[in-house]
Image (tube, grey):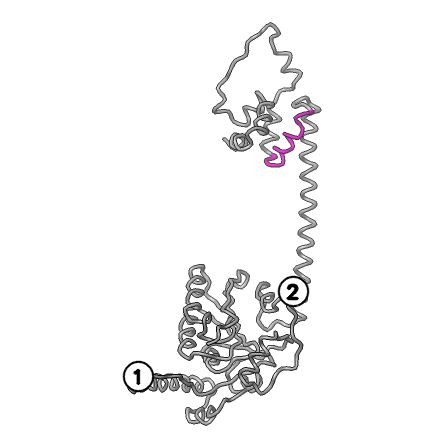
Amino acid sequence: MKKSKFIIEAYENRNTHSVNIKIIDYIGGYDNRASDIRSIVEQALQNGIKKAEVFISSGGGSTIEAQAMVLELRKFDSVHITVGALAASAATYLLTQFPSSAYPESQLMIHRPTIDTYGTVEEIKADLKLLENTEKIYREAYAKTFNKTEAEIDELWQNDYWMTAKEAYELGLIKNIISADIEWSKEVFDQLTACGAPKIPKTKLNSKNKMDKNKIISALGLAADTTDEQLYTAITEMKSKADVSAKLSEQLNEVQKQKVETLVANAIRDKKITADQKETYESLAKADYEATEKAIESLPSITALSGQVNPSSTTTTSENRDNWTYQDYAEKDPKAFEKLMETDPAKAMAIYERK
């Protein structure tokens, strides 16, 4: 079996309190297994997420894996599925279990389950019984969803039964058709061709440098059927708010800068600190304006302090500074603290934060 080029992707959308899950290509391949869904579901539930938005573009695959995926997704309180270019075979089973939407160009297909088997007569009989059970489950699911009898489903899926989004909507397989243009990737066209889809959308291939529209919609917390015009409006409004916020932030920073500069300039004018201490006190004021303001207010003027010095004194007291706070340094020896910031910034910050 060829390894799938795509995998199950998931990310949590905090705006909508949901997890966005993308299922691409073969269900039950190397990467698209129910165990992958289980990991995503468990992680989301642990994070308090109880809602899932699922995007699927798949030609089908293992009927058993599809059933297991449904059982995992049922652990959420709410699940909505959006069909991309294709939902065929086992992929449509998910649509019978949860509310689903599709694009006008989406292709959908159902057919009777099949099985590859080999081995002894007993082993083949066992596989046949499994196939009969699976066919019964799928037949009942389609009959209930389409509001048809099981005999009518048998008539319907004798061969591959392809549906446009409109036909799927009329049958009840999807609940909504998303009125939005979408550009399919080359891989999507390859999927449709490989599955034998009767109608290949005549749309332009999307360029590699374009962002996934669904990811943008989910990131903004918008509905899955958001139109391009609504998306543009939402982005414009967000940009406008961001511009205003940035401008206010710039103005606040300028006001704070002027406030700090005024505080330090006044301290120099009042001879609380010297001019060469300007940068030190500006840095402190930027980090904690109120604490620095109080420290400066408590400082005596340098002139007054010098008048109290005894010229005849030739000895200095070596005081134990282990328990000094920033307030002590500011009052008694600001130059020592300034030097400490240069030689041992970590220690200086610890002293600054000490109560």
Residue at (42, 94) in percent of width and height: 151
Q: Quadrant of residue 232?
A: bottom right
Answer with left or right where residue 97 lies relative to residue 179. left
- Check disc 2: other Cα within 10 Å, few if <14, some if 14-19, many if 20+: some
Q: Quadrant of residue 306?
A: top right
Q: Earlier in the sequence, mark 1 or mark 2?
A: 1
| Residue 239 to residue 273: above or below | below
- Check disc 1: other Cα within 10 Å, few if <14, some if 14-19, many if 20+: few
Answer with left or right where residue 308 lies relative to residue 94. right
Residue at (42, 60) in percent of width and height: 46
According to the image, label 2 marks what residue?
Answer: 234
Q: Position of residue 198 (x, y in %)?
A: 58, 87
Q: Nearer the viewer, residue 51 or 66?
A: 66
Q: Position of residue 283 (x, y in %)?
A: 63, 33
Residue at (60, 34) in percent of width and height: 290
Q: Does the magenta portion include 307?
A: no
The kind of residue on which mark 2 rests is: Ala
Disc 1 or disc 2, which is closer to the eye?
1
Range shown magenta: 275-289
Q: Position of residue 189 (x, y in %)?
A: 59, 79
Q: How many numbered marks are there?
A: 2
Q: Position of residue 334 (x, y in %)?
A: 59, 23
| Residue 146 to residue 214: above or below | below
Q: Does the magenta portion include 277?
A: yes
According to the image, label 1 marks what residue?
Answer: 123
SS at mark 2 in the image: helix
Task: Say if mark 1 contacts mark 2, CB within 8 Å.
Answer: no
| Residue 312 to residue 60: above or below | above
SS at mark 1 in the image: helix
- In three-dimensional space, the C-alpha distance between marks 1 and 2, rounded to whole angstroms, equals 58 Å
Q: Quadrant of residue 200?
A: bottom right
The kind of residue on which mark 1 rests is: Glu
